[in-house]
Image (cartoon, coloured by chain):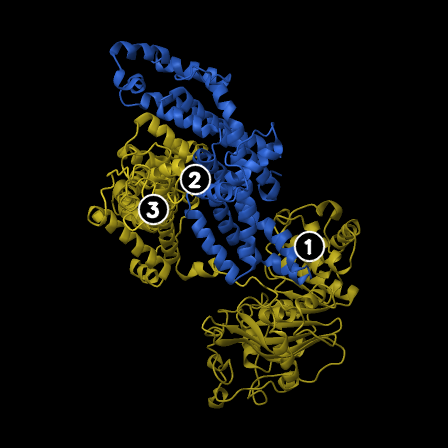
Chain colours: A blue, B yellow
Amino acid sequence: MRKLVVSRLALAVPQLVIVAFVVFSMTYLVPGSPAAAILGASATPESIRQVEAQLGLDRPAFERLIDWAWNALNGDLGVSFVTTLPVTDMLLQRMPATLSLTVGGMVVALALGIGLGVLSAVRAGLPDRVIGAATSVGLSIPEFWFGMILLLVFAVELGWVPVVAYVPLTDDPLAWLRGMILPSIALGIGAAALIARQTRGAMVEALASPYVDTLTAAGVSRRRIVLRYALKNAMVPVLATTGLTFRILIGTSFVVEQIFAFPGAGRLLLTSVIGKDFPVVQGGVIVIAALVIALNLLIDVSYGLLNPKVRPQ
Amino acid sequence: MSDLLTEHVPAPSGSAGSRRVWRRLVRQPMTMASIAFLLLLVVVALIAPLIAPYDPLAEDFDAVLLGPTAEHLLGTDEMGRDTLSRLLYGTRVALLVAFGSVVVAMAIGVPLGLLLGYRGGWWDRLGSRAFDVADALPGMLVGFAVITILGRGLLNLIVAIGLIFCMSFARMTRAVTLAERGKLYVDAARVAGLRTPEILFLQVLPNLTGPLLVQGAVFLGSAIGVEAALSFLGLGLDSEVPTWGGMLGVAANEQAQQPFLPFPPGVAIVAAVLAFNLVSDGIGDALAGERRKPAGRPRRPRTGAAPVDGARAAALVKGAPGAAVDGGPTRPDAVLEVRGVTVDLVRPEGESVPLVQDVSLSIGRAEVVGLLGESGSGKSMLARSVLGLLPPATRLAAGSILLEGRELVGLSERQLREVRGCGIGVVFQDPMAALSPVHAIGSQLCEPLRAHLKLSRPAARERAAELLHRVGVEDPKRRLDDYPHQFSGGMAQRVAIAMALAAEPRLLIADEATSALDVTTQSQVIDLLLDLREEFGTAILMITHDLGVVAESCDRAAVMYAGQIVEIGEVKPLFSRPRHPYTAALLAANPSDDVEVERLPTIPGGVPLAGQWPSGCHFANRCTHSREGCTQHHVPLADDVRCLRANELILEVLKR
């Protein structure tokens, strides 16, 4: 097990380094000078030079890279142009909401997706066709639009849940949970459809495997074969793509959080993109990338728990 | 949705003729409807100015936030602009961005993928770092970063979305190119003197067309979703320009006043994306041809649905004695008595084709009976019918199956469960596939013990270890926690045997149980089975195509050909004096290592497929002794042989 963790870490670290390098290069990709882009129409040569100095753009690129990397390693991602607050603090403040939403969406996606996928695989005929059609639609719905509709129906019309949803977990766990329901469903719906499709395919394949015959021939009940044996086999390919799904959910959460007024990283990034607040966008990309890489690491390791073949002997 | 689906697009392999693919596509109503809808969208985008009832930018502050009315069919927004007109104009941006971004993504991704896949080596290793970056960044974040750098605008939006998607195209192209590179024809082209770029574009690209179409269609839909999201966030086009996402942005703000606002653009997005997804699915199915169907469509996973329903089964049993005439006398001490069993394959069109025809067979206590035949003879199907384990689309059409005098045909799934494992155990051909790869063998071995003997968890484990020890697995306690891949084929088969015998069944069916093993292991496993027979008094039905196995292990044997038993009898006389020409031919075709023959005699022709059996004797068309009468009438099994000329032929077996 430790070997698996080490070997995955050996892949993750260079991955993060490369991402960091790409992010660093961002400011050099801006057509013209980033300073001019920031200042917009009001730019004068004088003010451009001033901003460039502030950005450190007047120094050699290599020197800046070393500085920037060293600071980033120490948790210092620079200072926002707009608020002059440390980027690290601004981002960290937003992570609980983003993580809540992403994890909530993942929980919905896994529960709904695996449930429907299994049902679809073992109930051929009408249930399978209905779930199949629902899956196709689910894959085509923009999550943020689905969130708007959910909000309209369950919060505005029916009043079952509060319109303004987010309460920090540490303030009131119950209110947090209640506020999480609609956003999680909205975010998770597309991934649920995807996982349902994968699960169905994997279950159909698993149930046609010879070991199912062996177990059936040994007198094991159908229910036990489906839930204990076929399902675990079917989860191997499904879990293999969970890391990918997580990454996508994080990105989608940036949009969904707007609907539910979640104070997540999306809103911060959005204002920074519009305000050309480079340090915040750069920091955001780095932090999110690190998060994605860490989650993938975690998933890969738990994948080893599920699939004995990838465990080093 | 956004980039969800696009990340998981499988690369369909193989290329069928494009005309054949198109013909398959035309036969898919959903795909054709989706294509028609998308064409309609294109037309709408083109003629939006002609059909839009209002100028999409015309404000009318006397009619703000209306619901659907006669003048404004889909209502108006917060500035009094007509929703229908904006929706129609929005089609333009949606399609433009969709096609534009996919073109950008392909323009970057395909050449990159071709390069990496074709060059390999360091190029590939370096280039694959780009995939690492893509793996760490959510697509939406890439969009944010690109728009931060480039600013807003139609072209920048297209570039941003194209960049989000390009790595997926590169990855897919690389995979296809790698596969194609290895193929012979690329080498052949190189020898013919083509230069590298020519090889890439002329030879590999056509093979990419299918996968690119499938993936491209998904991305077109996905791009509409991403564009909507970015426009909704205000990162797309100017809010003046009518876009579906921008309309949703307005709707989110004004939802409290006019709840109808989100519906028109939302439904438009869902419909367009759905149409692209369905087209992608359709193309994928058409490319995969019929091969993908059985896996993709419901396979009636109810494995246990062996016999017919209750009422039908009862009728069958009543009719059974008549059908059993062929089977010779019934034996009072029989463990298994199969009478007149017919298994049908039910074709999708509803027509039934027999796979096994009127088979009768009995096995006595502790007797080892061989069931011999080439593949396709129906021997495994017969075994499955005994267990009530017939595969989907097959059914037991007639016959009776008695286990120690108890009729199994028509038993409920629950009753069958008691028979399986406890009355009859099975060992299948491939020991690796017969055990779940992700469960420790201990947990699987304990299943029959817990189900039938009602042992507690620790007691079952204890017994499982004893069983493993009995079948010759060393260090059984520790090995219970091992997984199938940690066993050799022979050892895994021993585990499977232990599992089949765990609940001490009266009958063991060994369905080609030794065929996948090498010769030495094969003998060991046969010896083990025979030992266990001595110890437990278990009868064994040994299904095999291997004459050697039968000779080594069986007391009696039945020879099957094209769904029928053609000869049955004690092994020694059967092998030394075969009475059916097929048995004789089988024996002649069997290589024997102590005889040097110049050419192996083989039986000309092959086993006819189910549904194509000749009338009369099934073997007649391959038989060197056949004459006119053989093909005219059904040939019954008489005196244990199914041959009209049994009494006049003296069949020679090559001296062995």
Q: Marks 1 and 3: CB-CB under 8 Å?
A: no
| A242, A161: nearer the viewer | A161
Q: Quadrant of the N terminus of chain B?
A: top left
In the structure shown, which secondary structural element does the residue marked by tag 2 occupy?
A: helix
Q: Amino acid at mark 2?
A: Phe
Residue occupying image coordinates x 35% and y 22%? A276
In the structure shown, which secondary structural element does the residue marked by tag 3 occupy?
A: helix
Percent x, y of residue A263: 49, 28
Chain ID at mark 1: B
| B370, A90: nearer the viewer | A90
Q: Which residue is mark 1?
A: B495
Q: Amino acid at mark 3?
A: Gly
Alpha carbon distance from label 2 to label 1: 53 Å
Q: Which residue is mark 3?
A: B216
Q: Marks 2 and 1: CB-CB under 8 Å?
A: no
The vertical placement of B536 against A2, above or below, is below
Percent x, y of residue B361: 66, 78
Chain ID at mark 2: A
Alpha carbon distance from label 1 to label 3: 48 Å
- The numbered dot on residue A144 is 2
Residue A210: name its quadrant.
Answer: bottom right
Judge depth for marks 3 and 2 and give the one in front.
Answer: 2
Q: Is residue B94 left or right of residue A19?
A: left
Percent x, y of residue B283: 36, 55
The vertical placement of A53 against B248, above or below, is above
Closer to the N terminus: mark 1 or mark 3? 3
Chain ID at mark 3: B
Residue B507: name its quadrant.
Answer: bottom right
Residue B453: name its quadrant.
Answer: bottom right
Judge depth for marks 2 and 1 and give the one in front.
Answer: 2
Q: Amino acid at mark 1?
A: Val
Alpha carbon distance from label 3 to label 2: 24 Å
